[in-house]
Image (cartoon, rainbow, N blue to C red):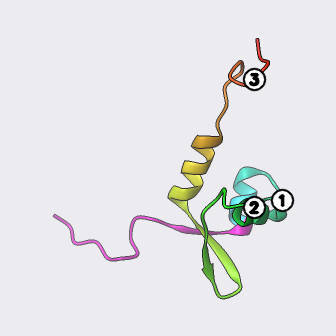
Amino acid sequence: MENRGPFEGDQLHTVAEVADHMRVSNMTVYRLIKAGEMPAVRVGKSYRIRRTDLQEYLQASRTVMGDAEGGP
């Protein structure tokens, strides 16, 4: 079995990278972090978002037509 270091496996992304991936503004990502909807790690004055946290956020936010209230 391969010995994995403490930093292998989960990649950290900047707010700008996450915003670009989600096609939203940086401010939207900052609002999600501040609201506690998207976990982030504070590094100095910057935030970093773990890839797995981004994937979990997107999966939890996923909707299918007809799932919303008032849908057909």
Give the magenta part as a residue range.
1-16
Q: Which mark is residue 69?
A: 3
Residue drawn at x 81%, y 59% is 28
Instruction: Please name the predominant secondary structure of the magenta segment in the image.
Output: loop
Question: x and y percent of residue 43 in the render?
Answer: 62, 83
Question: x and y percent of residue 38 in the render?
Answer: 64, 59
Vertical position of residue 10 compared to residue 44: above or below: above
Q: What residue is disc 2 on?
A: 29
Residue type, mark 1 in image: Ser
Callout 2–callout 3 Cβ contact below 8 Å = no
**Is tag 3's residue or tag 1's residue first in the polypeptide sequence?**
1
Residue type, mark 3 in image: Glu
Question: x and y percent of residue 66 in the render?
Answer: 71, 18
**Is tag 2's residue or tag 3's residue first in the polypeptide sequence?**
2
Mark 2 secondary-structure assignment: helix
Crowd rating for badge 2 (residues with CA inside 10 Å; few <14, some 14–19, many 20+)? many
Residue type, mark 2 in image: Val
Question: What's the distance in space between the residues labelled 3 and 1, CA to CA?
Answer: 27 Å
Vertical position of residue 42 compared to residue 35: above or below: below
Question: What's the distance in space between the residues labelled 2 and 1, CA to CA?
Answer: 7 Å
